[in-house]
């Protein structure tokens, strides 16, 4: 430590004499550390840091069944209340209404009208999570009753954005959906419901959901969360819950089925992204190893140029330990300077990630640089500094220091050459792994986008057209819907218009779909995804009709109940039969007759099958929870929006331009987790290619400079420029081939472990591996050809006189 100030001064003077080297090394280290810290902040937020609740390790997600649909995940209110009363393992049970509608709440009367997102929660929801309002209070017992006082709690974001963080907002009245509602509190900024429970969606407020017989009749609606009692395991609580569920099914055969599956809440929130995050962490580790190899090569070259200087210092009494300390200081100064740059890059990167609102990735909004991330950056800087700071010292034997004074250091030069060759091979191998990983994800992403959606999103826009209080009765609402469709269809260039309560890739509720006259085992019949639609919906969506007819305008309350089913439902419910004319029990009517069959639509996710789907005329069902108008037009998006707004202005009040969205956004949001992983891994792959090419270029350039006299002699003896270039490029390609072989084997093994991220391609996809070989070979050839071309232009006389 006593020599540290002197070593630092010497290092800074040396870097001032060679600013190009210092700037390049700091830039490479900064980019590598910046990428590493950014990804670690994602890993920290999603996998390491506990959920932002009180004692989050005791929180569990309580699913009804192990199915993808919301109706399978959710539970009836009666089951929830009984579980809360009978469970001895759960300290508390709470939940929220899972079928909330995005944009269901219209705020008027305070500035510009705005459509807001609200989620109804049960009485003890915030207490169970251990979250308290920043100002105000939570809901009282009266407020969570049916027809109780209207109350709402604002999110911190809405409070700051719309009400300028005015504390006087508590106790004031807002007009929401034409009703006066009292603001009773504001949640803290740290509480982000959407980031945890509904990634990609922001929520503006929370309303009380009554747990009552009236809401129990709605069926499976509650997404349940439980808090374990101290010392109780998830397995024990699940076993007890299943026992209670079986008792409830015997006692209440009139209710929907309930099974009860428990998982830690953290696993439910980030489980589907866990593999992708670990893949990104592995990718950034590979990038850092390439960075260390690159900087080690740079410092090896610099050490070779300073060999005589180091030998003279040794002759003057500097011991090897003293020289190691000097080299270590140089490495640490470079890495710590790079860490400072990398931390600045990470701050900008995490801020950008946190504002990716359209990305459906849990907890992404809370990604940031905290104390743990800063500690990781410091640890990474120190480790990298030691690795590439000491590598040159260990690559140079002590005898070489004495040989340097006698110009007899060929042995050490050979040793350094082997070390540098090994580092370049490692760079190529790691780059190979990243290129293959990015290639497999890219191929999977393309395959996902190539799937048949069942609808055509291009040239179609959607907008909410919920009827307001001016249309209180069902007949008035139906007349309103007819007026909306008539006005829009009269717009020149409109090819189709229809209304639905559930757009694709959004809501995924399920209803029973038992065929009349069929007996099902254990009384469990098939289920289907129901969609309430108007006439013209299939044309607006671009969904082809395969058999029978479309929903018609005269399929109303007084006509025969009918439905249209998709091909999957026709095939599974009536195998080998013509579904037209068949009858389904239930579905908003005692019986409903099938009049048409349409193509399957991707309603859950692009990677998943369509499942059974049934389309019911909205004029034959009750009130719609939401009403989305879909318009297909040959006009441009801006022209379509302007024309639709003008046409609907007399009857759809307070419609804003920001409420329109292209149908393509539904697809983009569905694939956003894949796009997020692909873009980040692809960026690392490109960075790795650049670093590998720089490493190859630096190695070959250094090799050429060391062989200047040899090259001059060979050229004087008649060697052609082409021969020299071919020999040097061949040397480069030899190293690249070794690296590609090692990296290819590692890529295949790692690809198998990450196969859960792939769709439509195998971990050994020949196209991806072939492209990797071509890309890395070309990169290596170009990186080797540039110094080879320079070497072939050396004047033999100048080379022979070179020392």
Image (cartoon, rainbow, N blue to C red):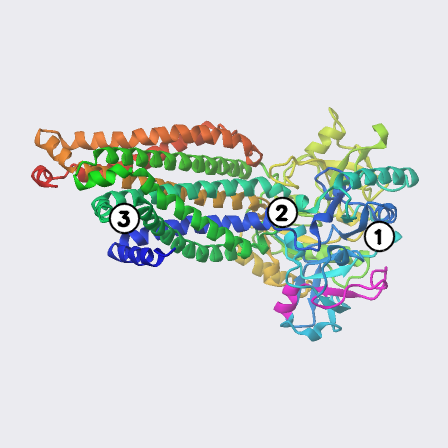
Marks 2 and 1: in contact by CB < 8 Å?
Answer: no
Placement of 42 over or under 685, stated as above or below: below
Question: Could you tell which of marks 2 and 3 lies nearer the N-terminus?
Answer: 3
Placement of 622 over or under 678, stated as above or below: below
Placement of 395 over or under 145, stated as above or below: above
Q: CA distance from mark 1 to mark 2?
A: 34 Å
Q: Which mark is residue 318?
A: 3
Q: Which mark is residue 540?
A: 2
Q: Secondary structure at mark 2?
A: helix
Question: Could you tell which of marks 1 and 3 lies nearer the N-terminus?
Answer: 1
Give the position of the N terminus as an image quadrant.
bottom left
Placement of 436 over or under 331, stated as above or below: above
Marks 3 and 2: in contact by CB < 8 Å?
Answer: no
- Residue 598 lies, in percent from the top left, at 67, 36
Q: Nearer the viewer, residue 307 or 431?
A: 307
Reply yes or no: does residue 763 show up in magenta.
Answer: no
Give the position of the C terminus as an image quadrant.
top left
Q: Nearer the viewer, residue 255 or 791?
A: 791
Figure quadrant of residue 158: bottom right
Residue at far right of view: 251
Would you say 228 lies left or right of 78 here? left
Q: Secondary structure at mark 3?
A: loop
**Span of residues in magenta:** 134-162
Please rate how many residues cluster around mark 2, counting C-alpha atoms within 10 Å: few if below 14, some from 14 to 19, many from 20: many
User: Badge 1 is on which residue?
Assistant: 215
Whether residue 522 appears in this view of the structure is yes
Tell us which disc is closer to us: 1 or 3.
3
Would you say 85 lies left or right of 544 here? right
Figure quadrant of residue 791: top left
Q: Secondary structure at mark 1?
A: helix
- Residue occupying the point 87% across, 53% down: 214
Whether residue 789 appears in this view of the structure is no
């Amino acid at each position: 430590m006593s020599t540290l100030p002197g070593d630092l001064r010497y290092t800074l003077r040396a870097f001032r004499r060679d600013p190009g080297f210092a700037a390049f090394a700091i830039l490479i280290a900064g980019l590598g550390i910046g990428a590493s810290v950014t990804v670690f902040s994602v890993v920290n937020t999603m996998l390491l840091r506990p959920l932002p609740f009180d004692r989050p390790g005791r929180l569990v997600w309580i699913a009804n069944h192990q199915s993808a649909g919301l109706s399978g995940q959710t539970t009836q209110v009666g089951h929830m209340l009984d579980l809360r009363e009978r469970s001895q393992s759960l300290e508390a049970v709470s939940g929220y209404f899972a079928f909330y509608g995005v944009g269901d709440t219209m705020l008027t009367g305070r500035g510009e009208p705005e459509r807001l997102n609200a989620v109804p929660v049960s009485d003890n929801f915030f207490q169970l999570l251990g979250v308290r309002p920043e100002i105000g209070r939570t809901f009282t017992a009266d407020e969570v009753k049916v027809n109780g006082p209207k109350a709402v709690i604002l999110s911190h974001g809405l409070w700051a954005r719309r009400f300028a963080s005015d504390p006087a907002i508590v106790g004031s009245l807002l007009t929401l959906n034409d009703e006066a509602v009292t603001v009773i509190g504001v949640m803290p900024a740290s509480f982000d419901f959407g980031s945890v429970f509904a990634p990609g969606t922001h929520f503006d407020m929370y309303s009380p959901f009554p747990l009552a017989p009236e809401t129990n009749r709605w069926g499976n609606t509650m997404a349940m969360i439980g808090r374990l009692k101290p010392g109780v395991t998830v397995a024990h609580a699940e076993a007890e819950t299943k026992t209670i569920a079986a008792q409830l099914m015997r006692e209440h055969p009139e209710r929907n089925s309930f099974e009860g599956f428990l998982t830690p809440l953290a696993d439910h929130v980030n489980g589907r992204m866990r593999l992708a995050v670990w893949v990104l962490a592995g990718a950034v580790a590979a990038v850092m190893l390439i960075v260390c190899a690159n900087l080690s090569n740079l410092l090896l070259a610099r050490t070779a140029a300073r060999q005589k200087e180091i030998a003279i210092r040794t002759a003057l009494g500097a011991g090897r330990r003293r020289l190691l300390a000097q080299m270590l200081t140089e490495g640490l100064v470079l890495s710590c300077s790079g860490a400072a740059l990398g931390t600045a890059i990470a701050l900008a990167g995490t801020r950008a990630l946190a504002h990716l609102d359209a990305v459906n990735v849990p907890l992404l909004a809370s990604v940031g640089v905290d104390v743990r991330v800063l500690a990781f950056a410091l640890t990474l800087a120190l480790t990298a500094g030691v690795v590439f700071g000491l590598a040159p010292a260990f690559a140079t034997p002590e005898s070489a220091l004495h040989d340097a004074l006698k110009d007899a250091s060929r042995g050490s030069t050979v040793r350094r050459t082997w070390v540098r060759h090994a580092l370049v091979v490692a760079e190529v191998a790691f780059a190979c792994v990243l290129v293959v990983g990015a290639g497999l994800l890219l191929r999977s992403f393309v395959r996902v986008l190539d799937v048949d959606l069942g609808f055509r999103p291009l040239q179609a826009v959607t907008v909410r057209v919920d009827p307001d209080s001016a249309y209180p009765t069902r007949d008035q609402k139906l007349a309103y819907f007819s007026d909306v469709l008539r006005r829009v269809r009269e717009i020149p260039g409109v090819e189709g218009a229809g209304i639905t309560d559930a757009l694709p890739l959004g809501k995924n509720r399920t209803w029973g779909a038992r065929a009349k006259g069929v007996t099902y085992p254990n009384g469990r019949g098939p289920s289907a995804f129901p969609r309430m639609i108007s006439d013209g919906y299939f044309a607006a969506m671009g969904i082809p009709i395969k058999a029978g007819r479309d929903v018609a305008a005269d399929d109303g309350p007084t006509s025969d109940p009918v439905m249209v089913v998709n091909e999957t439902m026709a095939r599974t419910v009536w195998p080998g039969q013509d579904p037209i004319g068949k009858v389904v029990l239930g579905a908003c009517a005692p019986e409903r007759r099938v009049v048409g069959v349409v193509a399957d639509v991707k309603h859950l996710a692009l990677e998943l099958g369509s499942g059974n789907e049934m389309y019911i005329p909205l004029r034959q069902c009750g009130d719609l929870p939401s009403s989305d108008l879909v318009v297909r037009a040959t006009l441009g998006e801006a022209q379509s929006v302007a024309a639709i707004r003008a046409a609907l202005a007399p009857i759809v009040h307070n419609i804003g331009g920001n409420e329109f969205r292209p149908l393509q956004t539904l697809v983009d949001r569905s694939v956003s987790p894949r796009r997020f992983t692909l873009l980040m891994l692809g960026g690392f792959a490109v960075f790795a290619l650049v670093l590998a090419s720089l490493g190859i270029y630096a190695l070959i350039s250094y090799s050429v400079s060391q062989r200047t006299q040899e090259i001059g002699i060979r050229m004087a003896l008649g060697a052609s420029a082409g021969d020299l270039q071919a020999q040097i490029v061949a040397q480069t390609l030899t190293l690249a081939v070794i690296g590609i072989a090692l990296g290819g084997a590692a890529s295949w093994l790692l690809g198998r472990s990450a196969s859960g991220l792939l769709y439509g391609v195998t971990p050994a996809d020949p196209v991806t591996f072939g492209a990797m070989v071509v890309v890395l070979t070309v990169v290596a050839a170009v990186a080797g050809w540039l110094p080879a071309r320079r070497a072939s232009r050396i004047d033999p006389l100048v080379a022979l006189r070179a020392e």
